Amino acid sequence: MNSEEKLRGLYTVWSEIKHYYPYQEKLERIDWEHLVDQFVEPVLNAQTIQDYYFELMKFISILNDGHTNVMPPWRYIVPGYSKPAIEVDIRDNTFRIIRVGNNEDLLLNDIQVNDFIISVDDIEVNEYFNGINQLYARGSKQANDIINAYYLLSGPKEKNIKLGILRDGKEKSVSLKRNCTSNGQFFMDSILDVNPSYIISVSDGMLNVAIKMFNDENLVNDFVAAIKENRINEIHFDLRNNRGGRDDLAYRLIEQIIREPLNGVKYKYLVSSKALSNWGTPDEWKVFDRLIQPNNTTNFTGKVTVSYDGGTGSTGEDFVIALSNRPNTYFNGTLTAGSAGNPYSVALPYGGQLRVSTFIGLDSNGNEYVGKGFNPNNK
């Protein structure tokens, strides 16, 4: 690693955000123009690619934008990192264990479901988790709590992790191996498990459609077939922890259950040209309105219910926003992730990528929801 390449990556991130990031007012608030100066020394001092990318990730995470980030060469899981076979639910600043794998270390340390984690490596758990969010900012607290729960216990595989555990009002301290196996198999956190990307089932006239990602062409055909082949009285979409995907698949589902055009999200984007600017024409903000046209081959117009949470982002969030305008549709959830942007990518040194949002996401009424989340029940 040489200094020129290190700085080239840092200033690529700084320049692309400065010139093309749509939330310019945010850049002014955080003084993006000079913020880069704080990262020159840490970037130059980085001795490994991992340390180098951690500094770039800290830099861009100050934007706190789920669709604008630095993707390191390893993408999601740091090489050589692992975690105990434990899954944690983060809610209202409490960290509750909801799944425990079956291996010798967890049995010896008596780790149980419904134990609460109160410290990690002798650091209060909320403070420790804030450090994780400084690397992996998702745009909102609710998104951080769900998506980043995986990273809470992640670290070098050869290094034990010390946890403070609270059970029935009594505290204890344990040192756990980062052994992510259960019954000899890899222990998969639910946040990582997106296969299959959807599950469709029918029970007593209820069509249940759980969608982790909108990425499978078969989704729409299977959805239509399930309605036509069964007597369906109600459809339930489970979009909890939906990681997005293809808008076209999401809207093709909605087309099948509406009779009238339906308003979707809006995209606010900047049209800028140096040539036009020099001729006296200022930059112009434009808004693209998504209008979903009916293509109802199923003749279904009945009741629809939708479950969602802070992990429902991107296309999943667009889906919730659009359905909030459909009659006879009901919602169960608090706030969606607050993350949208259709990012473009720029190559960075040593194999990583910068991703930058290209638009400002608006709900059907023209309100910004990125960084905030959307709750149909609060419309």
Image (tube, rainbow, N blue to C red):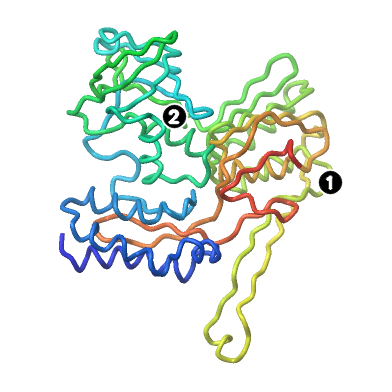
Which quadrant of the view contains residue 208?
top right
The residue located at (38%, 35%) in the rendering is 127
Task: Identify the secondary structure beneath mark 1.
Answer: loop
* Residue at 68% over, 39% down: 375
Q: In this picture, is 157 found above or below 279?
A: above
* Marker disc for residue 260: 1
State the image coordinates of residue 210 (x, y, percent, origin top left).
59, 28
Horizontally, residue 328 falls left or right of residue 225, namely: right
Mark 1 Cα-neighbour bin, 10 Å: few <14, some 14–19, many ≥20: few
Residue, far bottom: 279
Q: Is residue 300 above or below residue 269?
A: above
| Nearest-to-viewer mark from 2 and 1 | 2
Q: Is residue 53 above or below residue 192?
A: below
Q: Position of residue 111 (x, y in %)?
A: 34, 12
Q: CA distance from mark 2 to mark 1?
A: 36 Å
Q: Nearer the viewer, residue 168 or 179?
A: 168
Residue 305's tag is none
- Disc 2 target residue: 193
Amino acid residing under circle 2:
Asp
Q: Left or right? Give the position of 178 relative to 196.
A: left
**In this rendering, position of residue 230 left or right of residue 358:** right
Q: Nearer the viewer, residue 166 or 145?
A: 166
Specify the amino acid type for callout 1: Glu
**Which element carries disc 2, helix, strand or loop?**
loop
Percent x, y for residue 30?
A: 46, 61
Of callouts 2 and 1, which one flags the residue occurring earlier in the amino acid sequence? 2
Residue that appears at 56% across and 77% down: 272
> Where is residue 20 drawn, in percent x and y?
49, 68
Quadrant location, the C terminus? top right
Residue 91, above or below 41: above
